[in-house]
Amino acid sequence: MNVLVDRKLNFSMQILIATPNQRTKTQGNQITAFRWARLLEELGHDVTIACEPDPGEISRTTPDVLIALHATHNSHTIVRAVKQFPQIATVVIMTGTDLNVDLAKDPSEPKFRQAFESLENATRIVLLEPASLELLRKVNTRFADKAVVIAQSASAVNPSQDEINTLPNVFGNPDTFKIAVVGHLRAIKDPLAAAGAARLLPQQSRVHVIQWGAALEDSFAGEATRKTKENRRYDWIGPVSHQQSLRQLHQCDLMVLSSHFEGGPAVLSEAIVNDVPIIAHKIVATVGLLGDDYPGFYRNANRQQLADLMFKAEQDSDFLNLLSDHGARLKERFAESTESNAIDSLITGLPRNT
């Protein structure tokens, strides 16, 4: 009998994963929740996912462990669960705005208090990249002592020719250098950065920026549609499924990650595992995952810096290979087995109900 089966027999737990109430199933927290649920079930646990569960739902699941994605949005769930089940083990996964925005507010602000209270009640705190540990320490050293880092994993895709044939026409032009921008359109993502940078490229550039994701803030739908009509180098193709997103990313030459804040972007993991080079805004999360010496960073949301790097990646094969080689060295960090082992260590190390 192998070790994994032994763990399934000895450490099976009832686990409730609480997620924020989000508009689409392809938002980052939802993708993380479903992946964690699958990995936990493969480890032998009984898992339920619920959006901001009420007391009745918590009672019905009688969990040994509550895993809450986003400290602020799930603060009421966490507090209720700890009161209802004093022996429950609570894991809070910091997913981005809770750490980078809410806990950066004045301590008198409601969102700060909600996030702080969640972390006070947490048995363990999960960060999705290591550089945020120092941010957490500045909030409270006790929180940092509870924290573990578990990077998000991704799987490589190898789309069939039939699947490739179903992609939008913008993916079929062999004469363009395709740059992906992946994610829903929200201000915190600086979603139109690559579109703006594309307008600064030299005339001879073959760059075509292809962006997908839903416009979660209404102003972006009109703006992205207008830029698609006006900018020959840019297409916004709207929301797609997660699997479609992976197939589309696989067909691109480069990906731009332009966010102002991230917790540990899954799309970065997906690009690395699928051998897609990355240009990224230099923020805490991207430094934590790619390293401070990563050659593909641009700073301070500077559109001209971003355009220069996009053009360099298109024109300079040595630079593009440098980005690829850096990503290849990081692949093991984002392997599913790495994440699964880390989750297993986290769960089996929690105090168990008596």
Image: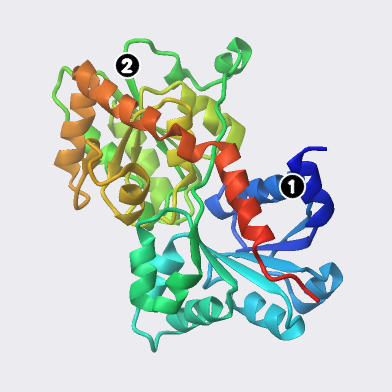
Q: Secondary structure at mark 1?
A: loop
Q: Earlier in the sequence, mark 1 or mark 2?
A: 1
Identified by mark 2, the residue type is: Thr
Q: Residue 339, relative to residue 104: is it above or below?
A: above
Q: Residue at x 64, y 46 (%)?
A: 35
- Compute the Cα span from label 1 to label 2: 44 Å
Q: Which residue is under mark 1?
A: 43
Front residue (pair 171, 1): 1
Front residue (pair 78, 260): 78
Q: Residue at x 44, y 51 (%)?
A: 264
Q: Which residue is under mark 2?
A: 176
Q: Position of residue 99 (x, y in %)?
A: 42, 67
Q: Residue 227, relative to residue 264: is it above or below?
A: above
Q: Secondary structure at mark 2?
A: loop
Q: Position of residue 33 (x, y in %)?
A: 64, 53
Q: Position of residue 262 (x, y in %)?
A: 40, 55
Q: Dot 2: few (<14), some (14–19), or many (≥20) neighbours within 10 Å? A: some
Identified by mark 1, the residue type is: Leu
Residue 207: image quadrant is top left
Residue 323: image quadrant is top left
Q: Could you tell whether 122 is left or right of 324 in the image? A: right
Q: Dot 1: few (<14), some (14–19), or many (≥20) neighbours within 10 Å? A: many
